[in-house]
Amino acid sequence: MPATNFYHRHPLLNSYLLSFLTFSLLLPPFAHLAIASMTDLEKRQRVKNMYTDYRKDFPGVPEIDAEAAISLLSDPNVVFVDVRKPKEQAVSMIPGAIGDKQFRANLNRYRDKRIIVYCTISYRSGKLAAKLARKGVTVINLRGGLLGWVHAGGPLARGQQPVNKLHVYGRKWDLAPSDIETVY
């Protein structure tokens, strides 16, 4: 039976297919609207839930929550390492943080320091922490990443300038509190 006859004989199937395609095409914009309508508390909870799910990919990696990490910001024995891409780092970083490339190029320089790695939600940094652990380098993953950091009130900077702008990697991670401008 030719395909055109099949669809003409099954108009209900046609209706289902049209509804499915319409829903599939419109889902991403509606998903973003759902995030945009979330309260800061709901966004913070979503960050915690996402990180908990991601954590399964790097079990055993030591971690620290944002509140505890914020209290270490001025400790000279703590180094924050941003493992995001340079275009993300160019928007903002934790004040005084260094990039992943600088850290890995000078591992011996940081051996006696407490190293806290992070990215947007700490998935990439968790994977890096697991990889480094296999090489005998211990680092601590920032639970919830920069999203957890800003929800806990942690500051951001571009160079030496304080900023309220964060690169969130993509729409799915656009979960910063309402006082933080996001880009992706």
Image (spheres, rainbow, N blue to C red):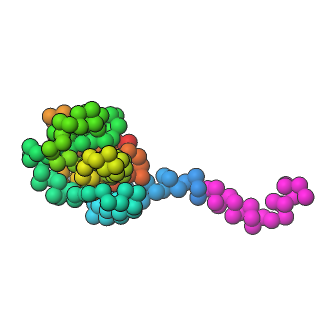
Nearest the viewer among 1 and 83 is 83
In the rendered structure, does residue 131 fall within the stretch colored magenta?
Answer: no
**Where residue 115 appears, x then y in whole percent?**
20, 47
Horizontal side of residue 15 vs 108, given as left or right: right
Res 43 visible: no
Q: Residue furthest bottom?
A: 12
Horizontal side of residue 175 vs 171, given as left or right: left
**Where residue 109 appears, x then y in whole percent?**
17, 36
Instruction: Kindly report the secondary structure that dominates the magenta region of the rendered protein.
Output: helix
Q: Please give the name of the residue rendered at 20% of the width and 37% of the height, measured from the top-left corner.
A: 108
Q: Please give the name of the residue rendered at 81% of the width and 59% of the height, measured from the top-left corner.
A: 7
Q: Dividing the picture into quarters, in which one does residue 95 lie?
A: top left
Q: Please give the name of the residue rendered at 27% of the width and 64% of the height, measured from the top-left corner.
A: 41
In the rendered structure, does residue 9 fall within the stretch colored magenta?
Answer: yes
Q: How many marks?
A: 0
Q: Please give the name of the residue rendered at 25% of the width and 49% of the height, measured from the top-left corner.
A: 139
Report the quarter where the N terminus lies. Answer: bottom right
Res 123 visible: yes
Q: Which residues are magenta?
A: 1-22
Q: Dividing the picture into quarters, in which one does residue 4 lie?
A: bottom right
Q: Dividing the picture into quarters, in which one does residue 100 lie?
A: top left
Report the quarter where the C terminus lies. Answer: top left
**Where residue 38 appears, x then y in whole percent?**
35, 61
**Where residue 54 appears, x then y in whole percent?**
39, 58
Q: Residue furthest right?
A: 1
